[in-house]
Image: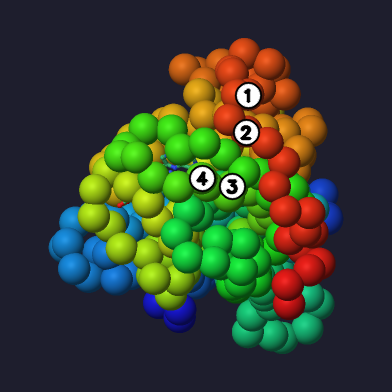
Amino acid sequence: MSDRITLKGVSATGHHGVLDFEKRDGQTFVVDVVMQVDLAPAGTSDDLTDTVNYAEVAGDIVELIEGEPLDLIEALGDRIAAKVLTRPLVEYVEVTVHKPQAPVGHPFTDVAVTVERARDTPVVVAIGSNLGESLETIQTAVSALWLALDLKSASRVYETTPVGGPAQGTYLNAVVTGTTSLSPQHLLRTLQDIELDHGRERKERWGPRTLDLDLIQYGDPVFDTDVRLSTEALTLPHPRAHERAFVLVPWADADPEATLRVDGTVRRVADLVAEVSREGVALGPDVDLLEDGW
Ligand SMILES: Nc1ncnc2c1ncn2[C@@H]1O[C@H](COP(=O)(O)OP(=O)(O)OP(=O)(O)O)[C@@H](O)[C@H]1O
Ligand SMILES: Nc1nc2c(c(=O)[nH]1)N=C(CO)CN2
């Protein structure tokens, strides 16, 4: 994906510089940003909420130029990049900070630094399957997930009794954790593509499926960086995760320190496990999802 929004030449007066008179007198700083954003949703919907509002980004940049004086334009570029990446739709940003009036001591036209930063957000994905060769499906799905995630841990595989929906066969469930550079919406679409590649058909709610990949959490509730969203297409954290033993038990297995926001309160997943019935959740085939099945 190489869709981009480019914003060039945002300028303001700042007091950044190593020399005393730079901090005292101030000078002009000029900033260019290139943001990698999936523009397909806004291209289809023609709706500003599906993209990044470049006017807001310009406002953030001016605020940082005019804000706390720093010694180095490297530090200013770093802070601008971090601020731009707080927008969930931005997956990667390149920031160039120009300082055309810098005290260089010789004729020059411009000096600039460029920093590139990618999003690296912790995420949790729950995997389920109860149709076809479920274990093989889960193993190949985990291999495919490497395209979207830098995987950090995987639970063991659990055999679980179906919860809800029509009468159907036993599930295999697992949970993986990792980090991603993708936005939540882009990650969900990638998960859905992997489901389709594994023969997923949507017929009835909570019906049997070859592969289900649910995005459980995006960001870290402990640092208040978890994305909270409540749209039909994507709800975060997953609205039923906190009550599902087939998600919580493998999740605590993959990450014993994991936390989940439940009704606004950050809870330890291990404590939530203690509050739900574990009935119908048992260890399944003994495989290491990050090592076996390649
Ligand atoms: N956090 C999320 N993870 C995955 N899908 C989500 C999420 N939030 C909303 N959805 C939406 O839910 C819709 C139905 O997804 P799916 O068919 O996988 O549901 P399900 O697995 O049968 O039920 P459940 O949502 O209870 O797990 C999808 O089209 C998707 O856009
Ligand atoms: N045991 C079990 N039950 C379910 C599962 C699942 O993955 N495992 N997924 C559902 C819808 O996502 C509905 N019910």
Q: Amino acid at mark 2?
A: Val
Provide the residue designation for mark 2: 281
| Residue annotated with mark 3 | 173
Q: Tell me what residue is drawn at x 40 percent, y 56 percent.
A: 209
Q: Which mark is residue 166?
A: none
Ligand 2 within 8 Å of disc 2? The answer is yes
Secondary structure beneath label 4: loop
State yes or no: discs 1 and 2 in contact (Cβ < 8 Å). Answer: yes
Q: Are marks 3 and 2 in contact (CB under 8 Å)?
A: yes
The answer to whether mark 4 is within 8 Å of ligand 2 is: yes
Residue 109 placement (x, y as % from top left)? 63, 84
| Residue 271 vs residue 62, the one in the foreground | 271
Q: Write down the residue under mark 4.
A: 170
Q: Nearer the viewer, residue 41 or 234?
A: 234
Q: Secondary structure at mark 2?
A: strand
Q: Quadrant of residue 231?
A: top left
237 above or below 111? Answer: above
The earlier-in-sequence mark between 4 and 1 is 4
In the displayed structure, would residue 185 be above or below residue 40? above
Q: Amino acid at mark 3?
A: Asn
Q: Position of residue 254 (x, y in %)?
A: 75, 43
Q: Secondary structure at mark 1?
A: loop
The residue positioned 72% from the left and 86% from the top of the image is 107
Could you tell me residue 120's position as x and y percent?
A: 66, 57
Label 1: few (<14), some or many (≥20) within 10 Å?
A: some
Query: Gap in Å between the C-alphas at discs 1 and 2?
Result: 6 Å
Secondary structure at numbered mark 3: strand
Give the distance between the C-alpha atoms of the residues marked 3 and 2, in whole angstroms.
9 Å
Q: Is the residue marked 3 within 8 Å of ligand 2, measured from its CB? A: yes
Circle nearer the N terminus (4, 2): 4
